[in-house]
Image (spheres, helix red, strand yellow):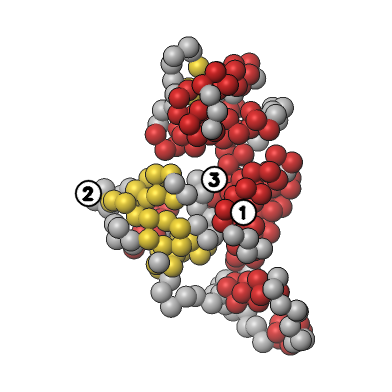
Amino acid sequence: MAQAVELTESLEDYLEAIYRLLRENGEVRVKEIAEMVGVKMPSVSSALAALKERGLVEHERYGQVTLTATGRETAEFLCRRHFALIAFLRGILGIEPEQAESEACRIEHALSPESLRRLLMLLDFIERCPRGGEEWLEQMLARWENPPCERDCAECIRGIEVPRGNPFAARRSSETETTLDRLDPGRKGRVLRLSGEPQIRRRLMDMGLTPGAEIAVERLAPLGDPIEIEVRGYHLSLRKREAAGIAVEPV
């Protein structure tokens, strides 16, 4: 990431809103930002002036709002940070969705790039390590409500077989598990995990495609590529090869 630009919590919220609106609509105006952030239009104009002064946005009076290269990079970091926190709070700690969203909004402003990197690595480790997976996660979630189990940890570890060829093959799969590219329009699924190249997985997380997120397939292009989906209230288009790397459980 480029040299960090100093932003207040409020300006971070505005920049994140602009980025999300651009991804959803392709263009952004002051009125749309005001509606998303929940403020009056004059407040948005003042925030845009501050963001423009920092070289993050381009905006002329009554015109559309666009992000500079630095603004886009900064906004992508903010979104990645937000969705990583939600994935951790919901998927690992078992916090209810509304509470997780509220707490992520409060915590995210204090999370550094290095802490975010380590949090993403932790989520990836939990999701992909052969000693992790759904069964391990279910046991840990149960601990929030119940006393620790009485089984010896060494006994559990000895019972795990780690294949030599594919270290991730020991993961337990749901009987109904499939991939996003196989869901028909009108169907919904819950994200189980993401696979593929690290850069692609990170970009998908930027868009809100984190474990536990519910996805609705809206339509397919005539040749089946791209695939239009709805996730977390946003409408996105994915290439078929990207969708093939997203394991989902139909709901």
Residue ID for mark 2: 222
197 is higher (above) or lower (below) than 138: above
User: What separation in Å lies between label 1 and label 3 (alpha carbons)?
Assistant: 20 Å
**Residue drawn at 58 percent across, 41 percent down:** 79
The local secondary structure at tag 3 comes to helix
Q: Which image quarter holds the N terminus?
A: top right
Q: Nearer the viewer, residue 151 or 40?
A: 40
Query: What is the spatial separation of the Cα atoms under label 2 and label 3, in whole angstroms?
Result: 27 Å
Callout 2: SS:
loop
Q: Is residue 15 visible?
A: no
The amino acid type, in three-letter code, at marker 2 is: Pro
Residue 126 visible in the snapshot: yes
Sequence-first tag of 1 and 2: 1
Q: In the rendering, at what x and y percent does residue 54 appear? A: 65, 20
Q: Which residue is mark 1?
A: 99
Specify the quadrant of the image occupied by residue 37.
top right
Residue 2 image position (x, y, % from top left)? 66, 31
What residue is rendered at 34% in x and 55% in y?
217
* Residue neighbourhood size for the residue with mark 1, other residues' Cα within 10 Å, grouped as few (<14), some (14–19), many (≥20): few
| Number of residues whose C-alpha sits closer than 10 Å to that of mark 3, classed few (under 14), some (14–19) or many (20 or more) | many
Of labels 1 and 2, the one closer to you? 1
Amino acid bearing label 3: Asp
Q: Is residue 79 above or below residue 231?
A: above
